[in-house]
Image: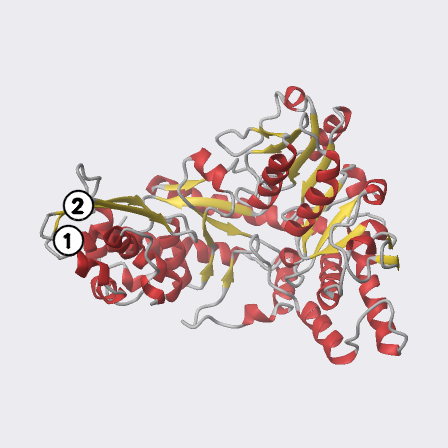
Amino acid sequence: MISLDERKVERIITDFPILAKPTSRGKRLVYLDSAATSQKPQSVIDALVTYYSEYNANIHRGVYEIAARATDAFEAARETVARFVNADSREVIWTRNATEAINLVGYSWGLNNIRRSDVILTSQLEHHSNLVPWQLLAEKTGATLRFIPVDSRGVLQLDDLDALLEGVKLLAISHVSNTLGTITPLELIVPKAHAAGATVLVDGAQGVPHLPVDVKALDVDFYAFSGHKMLGPTGIGVLYGKRALLEAMPPFLAGGDMIRKVEYEHTSFNDLPWKFEAGTSNIADAIGLGAAVEYLESLGMDWVRAHEQELLGYALDRLAPLERRGLAVYGPKDPQLVSGVLSFNFADIHAHDLASILDTEGVCVRAGHHCTMPLMEKMGWPATARASFYVYNTRADVDALVDGLEKAAQVFKL
Amino acid sequence: MDDFYRDFILDHYRNPRNFGTLEGATATAEDLNPLCGDTIRMDLRVNDGGIVEEVRFSGKGCAISQASASMLTEEVKGMKLEDVAKLGKDIVLENVGIGISPTRMKCATLGLRVLKSAAIGEIAGWPDEE
């Protein structure tokens, strides 16, 4: 018997045209790399095509009809995204991606607030995007970088959090680890960080796509995420920031659209959020991200979370027998503690060889260091293979992964 | 790609030839594939006549990069250093045979790149891009 949930996923799959196209070997496409980038539903593709084919125009100052329509759609997308994370739309700044959002804070807030005696606290499991900008900021300001340690399962060790937070001016932490899927207990950490006088930035690139997120309830100061990992187009991302902080920050990039009045010697800047959006914005992709958010809202983020937990639980059950034959699954192996991410190695098969063999069966997984080289080094993993789940994945996809691993065992004569 | 992993490839992967480092090496190079982090180091001992007398490689990575490097070390022993510097990707393709996908070509040619770097004394280009 097919459950209601499976019917729902079957319907979802039909919304993603790429999933209907077989691979060059005639295999069904089993896409297990959504943590790298998600697939796009037809509604998002349509939003892009409609903008370009019906009302392509620059925004904000056009007086003609299609320019007004473009402006309305662009700002409506901002409202949609703001509603999705419970922000005020003036606090939602379009960027290229989470990386650019984090760099915006590093340059605009960081260079004006971080001093030599300050500490920047981050963790040992960060993506390079939430590590390298702070290394640069520390180099420029003379501030000290400090790290929340992780244990052998990749879980943040918070026993000494009070001591770690001493002297911290900025806490920059990911909501969800891209390599292991471990979820940061923000509700525990953020109040303590604030009590210690720290400003809190959260890298939510793997958070917003997979978990219900309420930036006001989390009480974070900055929250960064990317559109392309949440069913939206590439090239569009978001920086959420508390209004008072954003008001006090100088512009990041300067140019058109971010100004109020320009004289030869002096310029006054536009209101939020446009103060941070110099030049012509990525209009089409912002509108596309709005459509992606509406799609996720139609599914419900509680359902998305529950669906991924269910799939991860099923995958852990299916993979357990392979552990006798050398499969190593990393992370806490607890669907309560992680999002739909599964990092693993199989006996002496290198992760890249594993990914190549899975590819011959149409199964797409990522292999390598997942842009977390320090974490890999600390854990002693040269590379891992990573399968990640999203709204369109099914138990059949997990079964295809397991079959692919069986094939790899055969090829490598395990 | 699955037909790539034939017995002799797996044998070179699991039992790499000339593996280790070389005392008294006259030329050494080391590099990594930034796409995946695979590393290879090549140590050469070249005699006064410009002949490669001894070679060792070390590193870690996938079956393609390690087996390809292992096979190369068997071939360059006894070669003139100037000829090693001129090697192209053909030797790698002949060694590893069919089935390498374009996305894995850098894995296959990493060892050759490091070997050529050792031979010419500076970082060589990617053989698959020549």
- The residue tagged 2 is B18
Q: Position of residue A27 (x, y in %)?
A: 44, 69
> Relative to A56, does residue A362 appear above or below in the rendering?
above
Bin the neighbour count of mark 2 within 10 Å (Cα to Cα): few under 14, some 14-19, many 20 and up.
some
Residue at figure coordinates x 76%, y 61% from the top left:
A294
Residue A217 falls in image quadrant: top right
The chain containing the residue under callout 2 comes to B
In the rendered view, does A131 fall on the left or right side of A79?
left
Q: Position of residue B43 (x, y in %)?
A: 22, 45
Mark 2 touches mark 1? (CB < 8 Å): yes
In the rendered view, does A390 fall on the left or right side of A376?
right
Amino acid tagged 2: Asn
- Label 2 – label 1 distance at C-alpha: 8 Å
Amino acid tagged 1: Glu
| Along the line of sight, the residue nearer the viewer: A396 or B80 | B80
| Along the line of sight, the residue nearer the viewer: A260 or A228 | A260
Mark 2 or mark 1, earlier in chain: 2
- The residue tagged 1 is B74
In the rendered image, which quarter contains the N terminus of chain B?
bottom left
Residue B102 falls in image quadrant: bottom left
Are callouts 2 and 1 both on one chain?
A: yes
| Along the line of sight, the residue nearer the viewer: A408 or B10 | B10
The chain containing the residue under callout 1 comes to B
